[in-house]
Image (tube, coloured by chain):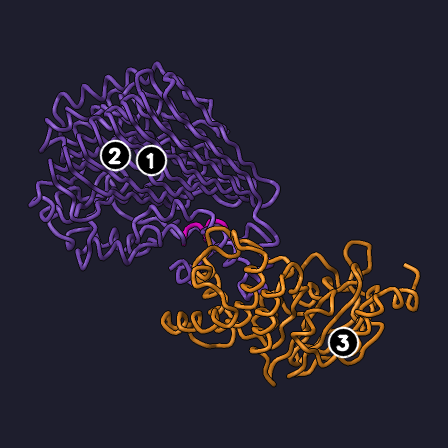
Chain colours: A purple, B orange
Amino acid sequence: MANEILEEHINKDYEWGFTTNIDADEAPKGLNEDIIKFISAKKNEPEWMLEFRLKAFRNWQNMVEPEWAHVSYTKPNFQDIIYYSAPKPKKELASLDEVDPELLKTFEKLGISLEEQKRLSGVQSNIAVDVVFDSVSVKTTFKETLAEKGIIFCSFSEAVQDHPELVKKYMGMAVPPTDNFYAALNSAVFTDGSFCYIPKGVRSPMELSTYFRINASGTGQFERTLIIADEDAYVSYLEGCTAPQRDENQLHAAVVEIITHKNAEVKYSTVQNWYPGDKDGKGGIFNFVTKRGICLEDNSKISWTQVETGSAVTWKYPSVILKGNNSVGEFYSVAVTNNYQQADTGTKMIHIGKNTRSTIISKGISAGFSNNSYRGLVQIKKGASNARNFSQCDSLLMGDKCGAHTFPYIEIKDKSAVVEHEATTSKIGEDQLFYCKQRGIDNEKAIGLIVNGYCKEVLNKLPMEFAVEAQKLLAISLEGSVG
Amino acid sequence: MISIKNLHASIGDKEILRGINLEVKAGEIHAIMGPNGSGKSTLSSVLAGREDYDVTEGEVTFNGKNLLDLSTEDRAREGLFLAFQYPIEIPGVSNINFLRTALNEIRAYHGQEEMAAKDFLALVKEKSKLVELDAKLASRSVNEGFSGGEKKRNEIFQMAMLNPKLAILDETDSGLDIDALRIVATGVNKLKSKDNATIVITHYQRLLDYIVPDFVHILYKGRIVKSGGKELALEMEAKGYDEIKKEFEIAD
C-alpha cells in the first residue's frame, strides 16, 4: 500500500497554501469583553454560554503565556487578531448546492479533495464530516443517518442551541477554562467546532471527521471539539487541517475534550498539516492546542493518534485522565519537523483508577534546522494500584543542523505501579539510502520508505484513508532534506 | 556488457584503485580475488555509485552508456546489481514492499507499467524457492533480525526478482556455512544466462567450486596484476597471496 502512495509524484511546496476569495463576516480586530459579547451575540448564545466565556476571559487576563516549552517565537499580539470570521452567507445549509461554490473549489484544491468531495456530497462514503472554515462550521454531513442511531454530530454552535444540557454538563470537564493560557483564551473566544454524542450501547456506523481550514488573513482559529461516548459506545473520530500560505504567523488555539463512560471507547486521529512557514521560517501557524480525554468510568478507553507535519510552532499534549478502574489510555504520535519548524509535543497519562493502563509510542523526525521535542508525563496517583505504563520515544535525525529532545517526566505515588520507558535516537543512514538506490529507488522515495517504516507502529493505528494521507504527507514534508 | 578502462578512485587523499582494466561480456562469469585491502570492495562500490569515493581517472562503459555519468539508482535501473557484503537493515519496511517499489521503479525507467499485484506475488513465490527462502522472510522487514545466511540468501533473492544484466557479488561467501554457500551458489547458477554476466568478488577459492568462473583476476594494491582461467584461483589457494605480494610489491 505504502508503495502506491510513494510512487505518486509529489509537489515539493505546501500544496494547500492558496486562499479563497469568500465574502467574510468579520469582527473588528482585538480582544475585550465587547468582542466576546459580539461573538456570543452573533451566535445567538444563551446567557450561561456568555457567562462561561466572560469568566474564562477574566481568568485569562490574569494568566501568563507559558514559556517552559522548548520552542522560541515572537509571542502573538492578542489585540492584533480577528477573533471572528465567517464565510457569508451564514445561514443553515440544507444541501451541498447551497454551499458557496468558491468554498467547494477550495475543498477541491485541498490535497484530499476527492475524498473530501465525496464525503461532502455523500457519495459512497462511510465518513461523516463537519467542515470548519475559519470560525464557523459550514457543513455537517450524514446528520440524519447518524440521528437514526441517536448519534448527535453537529457544529458546536448548534449543540449549544439544540443540546444545551449536554454541552453544559460536559464542556470544561476535561479541559477546565482555567487549565492553561491557551485553553482559557479558547474558552473565551471559541467560535465553533464540532460536537459529538454517542448514546448508550451505540457503535458509530461510520467514522466521524472534522476538517479545519483557516482562510481569512489576520484571523485566529479557536475551535472546540467535544466528544462524549456514553456507556458501551464507540466512535472513531478524525481531524484534518490546512491553512493558506501567508507571511504572517496565524494562531490556532483549539480545545478538544473527550469523555468516555463505562465500557466506552473513543479513538481520535489527527493529521495536522497547518502551513509550516517557508524554507526560511517565515510565516506559518502557531498551533497551541489543548487536547484531553477523561476515562470517566470503568473499562473505558481513549486512544489518541496524531501525525504532526505542519505548523511553525506546535505546542500540544493530547492526554488521558484514567479515572475509571481498568481504563486504558493510548498515545501514538509521529511528529515531523523540517526547515525552521519547532514542535514540543507529547502526552500526559494520569492514572487515578485501579488497574489502569497506558501506552505511549512517540516517533519524532527532525530535518533541516528544526527542533523536535517529546515531552511526556506519566503520573501514577496514590491508590492507582497495579497501574501500568509503557513508553517508547524514538527520534530520527536527518542532517546535522536539527535537534531532537526528550523530556520524560514520571511521577509515581503508588508502589504497585509498573512503568517502562524506552528511548532511542538514530540518524537516517547513508547506508540505508545507498542500499535503496542500488535497488533502483531514488532518494526521495527511499526516504519515504525508510521514514514510513520507522513510523509504521503509529501509522498502523490510523484508519485506512487517513494512513494513506499521512504517508503522503510524511514524504512531502521531508523532501529535499537529505542528499 | 561492461568495459572498465584505467579506473582510478580514491577516498579522501588515499588512492585505492590505481588503474583497473576489465572487460566482461554477456554470458561470462568473472571472479576477482585478492588479499585484504587490495580494493575489491572499493571496485564494487565505485561501480555501484557509492558517493564516498571519487573517481579521479578512467572510464566505464555499461551497455553502451557512460556508467560514471549515471546516478546510483539509474545504474541499478540499467541492470547493475550489487549483492552487498553486509546487507543493510531497514526496520518497518517489508521485504515485499521494498522489492515491489524497486521493481516498479526499474520498470518505470524502461517505460513499462507497474507489475500487477498478483503477478508480483507469483514472482515472489517462484524466486524465493530458488534460494530456499522461507516465505515468512519475504514479509518481514528488510534484513531485520535475519541471520547472516538469511541476509545473503535475501540478496540473491532480490537479484532473482530484479533480474539484472550484471550482478556483482561482493564477498557473498563470507560468513556462510557450507549448506548456505551451496544454496546461494545454486541460486546464482540458475540465474545465469547468455544475456547476463556476473562478477564474483571473493577472498577464498571455496565459492568458485560452486560458481565456476570463466575468468579469474587477481587484484592487488588497486590493480589487476594477473588474469587467467579458473585454474588461477586454485593456484592462489595453494600458494596464498604471498607470492603475488612479493612479485608485485610496489611503493604506496
Between label 2 and label 3, give the one nearer the viewer. Answer: 3
Mark 2–mark 1 CB contact (< 8 Å): yes
Q: Spatial distance from mark 1 to mark 3, Cα to Cα?
A: 60 Å
Label 2 SS: strand
Classify the position of the C terminus of chain A by image quarter: bottom right
The disc numbered 2 marks a residue on which chain? A
Question: Which amino acid lies under the numbered mark 2 shown in the image of this protein?
Answer: Lys
Q: Spatial distance from mark 2 to mark 3, Cα to Cα?
A: 67 Å
Query: Where is mark 3, residue-wise?
Result: B216
Label 3 SS: strand
Classify the position of the N terminus of chain A by image quarter: bottom left
Principal secondary structure, stretch drawn in magenta: helix
Pick the front one: A115 or B172: B172
Query: Where is mark 2, residue-wise?
Result: A301
In the displayed structure, A277 sits above or below B6; it is above
Mark 1–mark 3 CB contact (< 8 Å): no
Rendered location of residue A323, percent (x, y): 25, 23
